[in-house]
Image: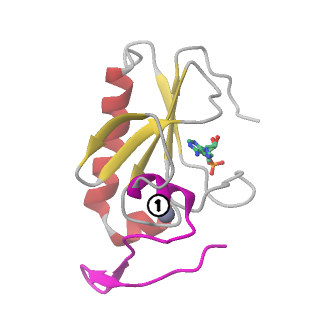
Amino acid sequence: MATIYVVGVTGEGQARIPSVPECLFCRIVSGGVPASVVLESPRTLSFRDISPQAPTHVLVIPKDHYPDLAALAAADGSLLTELVNQAAEVARAEGISGSGYRVVFNTGADAGQAVPHVHAHVLGGRGLGWPPG
Ligand code: AMP
Ligand code: ZN
């Protein structure tokens, strides 16, 4: 579990955590770890998953560090909306908004969340099975 560094406060007492030094995705945001960037907005970054599970497999993250979807939703609903809009923009840019795509937020151990910095997986370009494994 990542150490949480609280260095600022936004909104009604919600913690804002710009960066966690040992977090892989914070290091991608800061440029310390390379990534194949697909889209960038002032508060989000979209880059290709290093181990793609579909022809399109892009991760969309807030540049600030939130450990998971619930933490982001509680702290900053407008940033969550921006993240989801970026996922839709990625799908358009990848040419899969017509054929369909899946947006996944793995949360916690049973869902297999490996990186504790909230990220939306945008998957598409092939038929996706349901239910997921
Ligand atoms: P999750 O299991 O939902 O936490 O997803 C983490 C995702 O990050 C996995 O799909 C990994 O393949 C991906 N990943 C791990 N390291 C990197 C990296 N350096 N660049 C891009 N994607 C990565
Ligand atoms: Zn992080």
Whole-percent x, y for residue 26 in the image = 46, 60
Whole-percent x, y for residue 97 in the image = 37, 19
Figure check: 23 above or below 128 = below
Q: Which residue is drawn at 35% across and 44% down?
A: 84
Figure check: 52 above or below 40 = above
Whole-percent x, y for residue 20 in the image = 49, 71
Figure check: 66 above or below 31 = below
Q: Which residue is drawn at 52% across and 15% down?
A: 125
Which residue is tagged 1?
26
Queried whether the magenta region covers residue 9, the answer comes back as yes
Queried whether the magenta region covers residue 128, the answer comes back as no
Which quadrant of the figure contains the N terminus? bottom right
Q: Which amino acid does label 1 sit on?
A: Cys
Stretch in magenta: 1-30
Whole-percent x, y for residue 107 in the image = 61, 57
Which quadrant of the figure contains the C terminus? top right
